[in-house]
Amino acid sequence: MRDIPPSMDAAVVAAIDERLAGVEAAHGVRIAWAIESGSRAWGFPSPDSDYDCRFVYVRPREQYLSLWPARDVIETPLDAVFDVNGWDLAKAMRLIAKGNATAVEWLRAPIVYRGDLAFRDRLLAFAHDVVERGAVGRHYLHVARRQKAGPPSLKRFFYVLRPAAALRWLHDHPAEALPPMHLPTLLAESTASAEVRDAVHELIALKSVTRELGDAAPPAVLQRFVDDELARAEAFELVAPAHDRAAVRARADAAFRAEIGA
């Protein structure tokens, strides 16, 4: 599977493809899923946004049986344009089992450099089985709080707005625990007002042509939206685990063994 929008720089995409092939050759792994994360995948890039490629890789089965397992992260050199790194399958599955929303977002990314769709669907099914709404809600609530605590700027406000939109999506989908990562999609699939959606689209359009948004106050309608969603999401702090931890670990072990052919 590959899904690259035409707005992305073809030369940069080709360089990312080369990095991914280099990772496979240098480390003897198979990259099963590689996506774009960060502001491009979130739906609000700036003209100078870097490229944040994230991937999940699988080692040969015998390497998972070693007494000295390899590091579970592979990183490539970081610079002003490229931020390319990934997680071992085992790490990704452990994080999903814990309800890590970032790991789940990678599986729902709208921009895909390369990937085995069946692999993605199996991990998504696993996530649907084990991820708890309470853990995901707390993740987005805590992310928004951390960003609000930093120096105020319109750019930072986007990092508060997206988790607030994810919290609204969770409220509007009470039987679901895996929100999309793309901000416009979160709003389109929620009951956010037309006024909120219009204000978000205007702010995204401004960010798309502006390198520095400055420290102006965000539109009042969006500030109210954020405040209301974070206040309502306080309830996630009191949500108790619904799944038995041992059962989740057993489910994770079984899914992992199936993936590596053990």
Image (cartoon, rainbow, N blue to C red):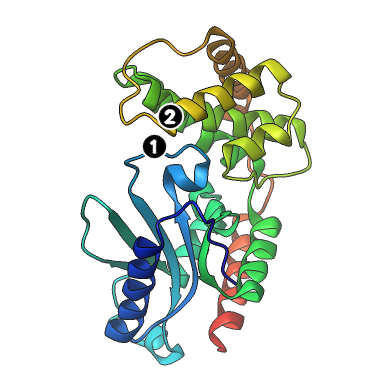
* Mark 1–mark 2 CB contact (< 8 Å): yes
| Residue located farthest toward the top when viewing the structure as drawn | 220
The tag on residue 46 is: 1
The image shows residue 204, relative to residue 179, as above or below, that is above
Query: Tag 1's secondary structure?
Result: loop
The image shows residue 136, relative to residue 68, as above or below, that is above
Residue in the picture at 71% in, 23% down: 192
Q: Where is residue 33 in the image (x, y as percent from the top left)?
A: 51, 70
The residue nearer to you, when weighing 182 against 174, is 182
Q: Position of residue 182 (x, y in %)?
A: 58, 42
| Residue located farthest toward the bottom when viewing the structure as drawn | 62
State which quarter of the image contains the N terminus: bottom right
- Please state if 64 lies on the left or on the right of 230 as rendered: left
Residue denoted by label 2: 207
Q: Residue type at mark 2?
A: Lys
State which quarter of the image contains the C terminus: bottom right
- Please state if 213 lies on the left or on the right of 245 as rendered: left
The image shows residue 214, relative to residue 123, as above or below, that is above
Q: Position of residue 181 (x, y in %)?
A: 57, 45
Query: Going from the N terminus, do you reach mark 1 or mark 2 first?
Result: 1
Residue in the picture at 70% in, 59% down: 129
Crowd around label 2: few <14 · some 14–19 · many ≥20 (10 Å): some
Q: Residue type at mark 1?
A: Ser
Residue 246 in which image quadrant: bottom right
- Please state if 262 lies on the left or on the right of 15 as rendered: right
Q: Is residue 75 visible?
A: yes
